[in-house]
Image (spheres, grey):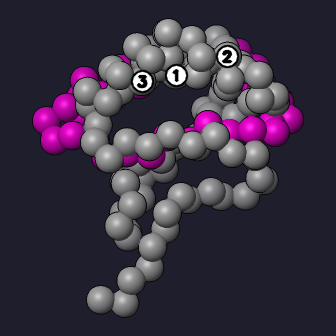
Amino acid sequence: MQPKHIYPEYALILTYNVRLGTQERYFRYITGELYPALERRELYMQNAWLIVYGQQPQRQIEFIAERLDPIRDLLDDPEWERLENRLKEYTEDYERHVIRYRHHVKILRLNYSSN
């Protein structure tokens, strides 16, 4: 399969921590259901971060889209509520952000502390 080339304008960013004891089920859900469902709606995963420093959630995944419409349509669809609620079963400190795409790394809430 050839890589899909798009010119992203928007990003859907999900941040969270994976609940202890759910890692295997979480991974199966993300790779087997969530990613494919978003890709069918023309939202493509660009990055998946494991953040090991600071006070923000440890996971951040970014889905990119060429237009805002696929993101709006997804968020208005009852399927998204089901997908998001299922993700929340495996996570805590969950947040969702929609931003204009910038062609650089986007780590949300990075908080350096001198404690």
Marked residue nearer the N-terminal end (1 or 3): 1
In this orientation, does residue 46 appear? no
As measured in the structure, the alpha-carbon distance from the residue carrying label 1 to the one carrying label 3 is 12 Å
Residue designated by label 2: 73
Residue 71 percent coordinates (x, y): 67, 25
Crowdedness near tag 2: few (<14), some (14–19) or many (≥20) residues, C-alpha within 10 Å:
few
Helix, strand, or loop for circle 1? helix
Instruction: Determine the residue positioned at 69% across, 45% down.
Output: 99
Crowdedness near tag 3: few (<14), some (14–19) or many (≥20) residues, C-alpha within 10 Å:
some
Task: Inspect the image, locate mark 2, and give the three-letter code of the amino acid beneath it.
Answer: Asp
Residue designated by label 1: 35
Instruction: Determine the residue positioned at 29% across, 37% down.
Output: 91
As measured in the structure, the alpha-carbon distance from the residue carrying label 1 to the one carrying label 2 is 16 Å
Residue 16's place in the image compared with 111, above or below, is above
As measured in the structure, the alpha-carbon distance from the residue carrying label 3 to the one carrying label 2 is 14 Å
Task: Inspect the image, locate mark 3, and give the three-letter code of the amino acid beneath it.
Answer: Glu
Q: How many marks?
A: 3
> Is 110 within the magenta?
no
Crowdedness near tag 1: few (<14), some (14–19) or many (≥20) residues, C-alpha within 10 Å:
some
Find the residue positioned furthest to the right: 7
Residue designated by label 3: 84
Helix, strand, or loop for circle 2? helix
Residue 73's place in the image compared with 96, above or below, is above
Marked residue nearer the N-terminal end (1 or 2): 1
Marked residue nearer the N-terminal end (3 or 2): 2
Residue 69 percent coordinates (x, y): 77, 22
* Range of residues picked out in magenta: 1-30
Residue 94 percent coordinates (x, y): 37, 42
Instruction: Determine the residue positioned at 75% across, 38% down.
Output: 10
Q: Is the Cβ of the residue at disc 1 closer than 8 Å to that at disc 2?
A: no
In this orientation, does residue 101 appear? yes
Q: Is residue 92 left or right of residue 3?
A: left
